[in-house]
Amino acid sequence: MIESGVAVVGFGRTGRAMLDFLLESGDPPSLMLYTDKPPDRDETVRTYKRRGVCFLAGPGDFARLGTAHTVVLSPGVDGRAERFQDLRNRGVSVVSEIEYAAGCNQATIVGVTGTNGKSTTVSLIHHLLRRAGRSAFLAGNIGTPFVSLVRKMKKSDVAVLEISSFQLEEIRDFRPHVGVLLNLTPDHLDRYPGVDAYAEAKQRLFVNQQPGDFAVANGDDPLVRQLLESVSRGKKIWFSSAGHLRGGVYLEKDEIHLDFSLKKDRVPLNTFPLPGPHNLENYLAAAAAVHLLGVSGRDIAAGAADFCGLPHRMETVGIVEGVRFVNDSKATNVDAAQKAILSVNVPAVLILGGKDKGGDFAGLEALIHQRIKRVLLLGEATDRIRAQLTGVSGILEEVEDLAEAVDRGFALLRGGDGMVLLAPGCASFDMFNSFEHRGDVFRAAVTELGMRANCLGGG
């Protein structure tokens, strides 16, 4: 029997934001919170219980979700599992948090997805809008749940959302006015049976768009082109770093050409501070998105000039005796690691490895041969990476942890201008709580190395 209740699955940041939103809605219907394992009985749990939340945990309690009319999933929960299909068969609506929040939202939505570059691109879009005088809010997979902001936003505001494939799996009516697809390469193959299923999840960003909406997408990515041809009633705006693209956004003669509107515009590249060809692609996408919302080329250039980028993304965390240490811990898949290596133009030591996500490391072999002096392997994926990089086996070396990797990289490059690059190409959860934690440990090891070097130098 379905009652007038809502259930939230997951008690992380998104789950708690959903509970807060529902509890603040006045007199909410019966409200349940389900987790596979009982949460710690801390003051947070006790507070929610006092506010009327019924906590459920484990398989024995899962069936009670069938009494709710709506079940809202946190991003890490796989709604394709049979147990959730059973709920749907019983008439329960199973949705993601962004779907639920969008039903309460009145702001213009810019939604950004893709395999890599999402966080940088949404942060840049948000920054450019704010610098141009627009009221904009940043939310989604970047950290702040969308639902926690919807009550703060007005119709004139812009919601800039980073959206993962997991979040897109359970949408029904979610519709961004501007949808952005940055790129598509194999990722999360520990969750999806193949790249086609992963791509189909990304494609859902555009399925509800209507004439008057916009689909901004990477025209240099063949998989993206194929995917977008068959979906979206919105106007397609292609961007390209390869040269002239009529009716789109492209690079030519150190300028971004915005060629898709009646009033064509240009943006000089000399103000953009982030390194690497992948960041130029992110800039093209961001420039297209904000120009669609009325930001001029001049304002785009001015805003980009003071954009600092994000931690753990090609972030220099220290220079010790001429050796630069670069933290790209957010490179959690092979394609992201490849883009990081492409940015290398000095002798370099690469730190690779972590929790494997099914990536094909063999695709890195040619680049490693051309640009990398030594590869330091760590984590669960070590044996798999070694097996796939047989062509450069002579420069592969195993380390126990990041502290050893930092010391070893420094020893290999000391006395010259070089770079120790943390671009793991893997998830972090074998040794760390998150990619941020991994990057912080790397930064701390570099700081400690610098202190030791200074002491020895001052001997």
Image (cartoon, helix red, strand yellow):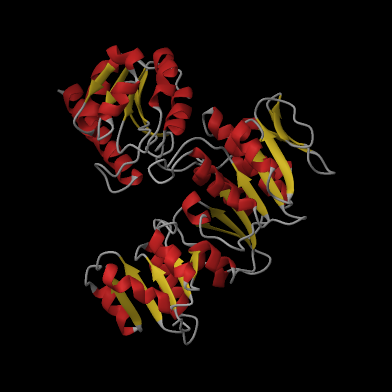
Residue 3 on image: x %, y %: 46, 84
Is residue 297 left or right of 15 when viewed as pictured?
right
Considering depth in this image, is 95 or 376 the residue closer to the camera? 95
Q: Quadrant of the C terminus?
A: top left
Indicate the quadrant where residue 81 lies: bottom left
Residue 423 on image: x %, y %: 38, 31
Indicate the quadrant where residue 457 lies: top left
Q: Quadrant of the N terminus?
A: bottom left
Is residue 7 left or right of 250 when viewed as pictured?
left
Residue 31 on image: x %, y %: 40, 79
Residue 320 visible? The answer is: no
Indicate the quadrant where residue 270 lies: top right
Against 86, residue 254 (above or below) is above
Considering depth in this image, is 309 or 46 the residue closer to the camera? 46
Residue 134 on image: x %, y %: 66, 58
Considering depth in this image, is 295 or 49 the residue closer to the camera? 49
User: Extreme left residue here?
Assistant: 459
